[in-house]
Amino acid sequence: MNKDFINLVEKYYNDMGTKAINIVDYGGGNLSHYKAIKKAFPHLEFNYTIVEKMIREGYHRYIYEVIDSGIKDIDIFHSNSSLQYSRDIDRDLKDIIRLNPRFIIILTVAITTKETYVVEQKNLSGISWYGGKTIPYLFFNTNYIKDRLVGYRQLYHNQNSFINIERAKLAFPDVPEDEFISANMLFEREVCV
Ligand SMILES: C[S@@+](CC[C@H](N)C(=O)[O-])C[C@H]1O[C@@H](n2cnc3c(N)ncnc32)[C@H](O)[C@@H]1O
């Protein structure tokens, strides 16, 4: 559970007024962040829309499905430890812009000072949401996401080592250990004057 999401909702709580907050959670099908938000703000009303590819039926599978569904005025697009599994990242980033959320919060993505690259994540036995043996996993160049979120300004970027280095070594045996860096990013829509 990444606390940055809770902090964002808290910080902009008043600013968003009393209306229901519209959240789109990409990769949120395990409901971890939905439950955390409900617990942190029991009196606040949410419209919580999930984009989820793997673990459960019944959610939108692509961002464009949310756009096509006519859901409007998204306050927060949120993704924790999920965007690196995108099968078409440039399309997804374009669709995030089309969704036009006020804030985009992208948490726990692997970043690199190299060019963006994709590796097979191995040793998935402990990952219940994915049935295969390996899954493509993106390491993003530090600027990759920011450069594509045209019309958004970055409010913060922070980065730390992966929480579980030993597991990362098993998952990415060909990736040097100093590449195990995870970033959190927050963007806000630029205001047109
Ligand atoms: C590591 S889990 C993170 C789950 C949750 N966001 C959390 O923080 O606990 C990655 C999630 O992304 C979902 N996912 C993987 N590929 C996806 C895709 N292309 N589109 C949407 N969700 C995807 C997986 O099914 C899984 O639920």
Image (cartoon, rainbow, N blue to C red):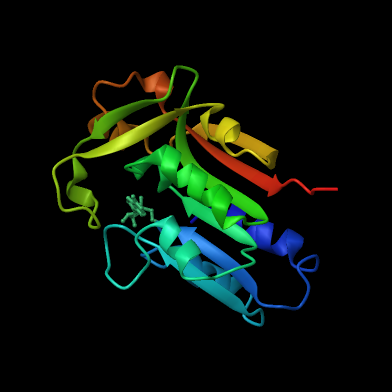
Question: In the rendered image of this protein, does residue 25 appear above or below residue 58?
Answer: above
Taking the spot 34% from the left edge, 18% from the top edge, the residue there is 176
Residue 61 drawn at (x, y percent): 34, 61
Which is nearer the eye, 9 or 171? Answer: 9
Q: Residue at x 61, y 59 (%)?
A: 76
Is residue 71 left or right of 168 when viewed as pictured? right
Viewer-side residue, 5 vs 114: 114
Left or right: residue 123 versus residue 6 is: left
Q: Is residue 163 visible?
A: no
**Going by the picture, which residue comes out furthest to the bottom?**
43
Q: Residue furthest right?
A: 193
Q: Is residue 16 left or right of residue 92?
A: right
> Does residue 75 lie above or below 96 as drawn?
below
Q: Number of marks in the image? A: 0
Q: Position of residue 104 (x, y in %)?
A: 60, 50
At which x and y percent is residue 127? 24, 51
Residue 54: x, y in percent?
Answer: 27, 58
Q: Is residue 41 above or below residue 130?
A: below
Ligand 1's image quarter is bottom left
The residue depicted at 74 percent of the width and 67 percent of the height is 13
Identify the residue at horizontal 56%, vertical 27% (top origin): 143
Q: Is residue 90 left or right of residue 54?
A: right
